[in-house]
Amino acid sequence: MVAKAFQDYYPDQVSHCYGCGRLNEHGLQIKSYWDGDEAVCTFQPRPYHTAIPGYVYGGLIASLIDCHATGTAAAAAFRAEGRAMDTEPAHRFVTASLHVDYLRPTPIDGPLHLRARIKEIKGRKVTVSVTLSAAGEVCAREVVTVEMPEHFLA
């Protein structure tokens, strides 16, 4: 049995995101999971995610990092409180700052691997360090998240 992804616990009203919303049939629907103290995600780019032939569009990279980080922040908030992700109140995060360092061109012909680590939890802010790798090389990194206002979840 496969564990549920962080994104599978999001309340329906906040599950429409293009990158990670399970209710967005046209979206990327990324899935993130714990692997020890890191959160992992694997995504297979499609031919239409092309920037130039052979390489992934940078906006896709930013979207993957963004959504993997916000999912990791939510999971980390639950973990810090010693609660399961299916308990109330729900935690859901949005991006406060997205600074992506594009370190090298990202090949499109294989899976992209994301790894996230929590750098700091401070009130509603969670700083998450994310790397995106392809073919064993880190291609991009970074994110800062903030918890959604409660009225978004109502």
Image (cartoon, helix red, strand yellow):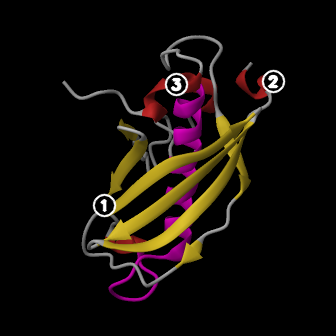
Residue, disc 1: 44
In the displayed structure image, the side of residue 79 where residue 133 appears, left or right: left
Q: Nearer the viewer, residue 122 or 63?
A: 122
Q: Residue furthest bottom?
A: 53
Instruction: Tell me where residue 77 appears, x and y as whole percent.
Output: 60, 28
Q: Residue at x 36, y 88 (%)?
A: 53
Residue, disc 3: 79
In the displayed structure image, the side of residue 107 where residue 130 appears, left or right: right
Location of the N terminus (image quadrant): top left
Q: For label 3, count other residues whose C-alpha is less than 10 Å away and answer few (under 14), some (14-19) or many (20+).
A: few
Instruction: Tell me where residue 122 appears, x and y as whole percent.
Output: 74, 37
Residue, disc 2: 151
Instruction: Kindly report the distance in space between the C-alpha atoms of the residues bearing marks 3 and 1.
Output: 28 Å
The quarter holding residue 73 reads top right
> As shown in the figure, which amino acid type bears the numbered disc 1?
Gln
Q: Residue at x 48, y 76 (%)?
A: 57
User: Is disc 2 placed on a helix, strand or loop?
Assistant: helix
Is 60 inside the magenta-drawn segment?
A: yes
User: Is disc 1 placed on a helix, strand or loop?
Assistant: loop
Instruction: Kindly report the distance in space between the C-alpha atoms of the residues bearing marks 2 and 1.
Output: 34 Å
Q: For label 2, count other residues whose C-alpha is less than 10 Å away and answer few (under 14), some (14-19) or many (20+).
A: few
Is 64 inside the magenta-drawn segment?
A: yes
Answer whether labels 3 and 1 touch (C-beta < 8 Å): no
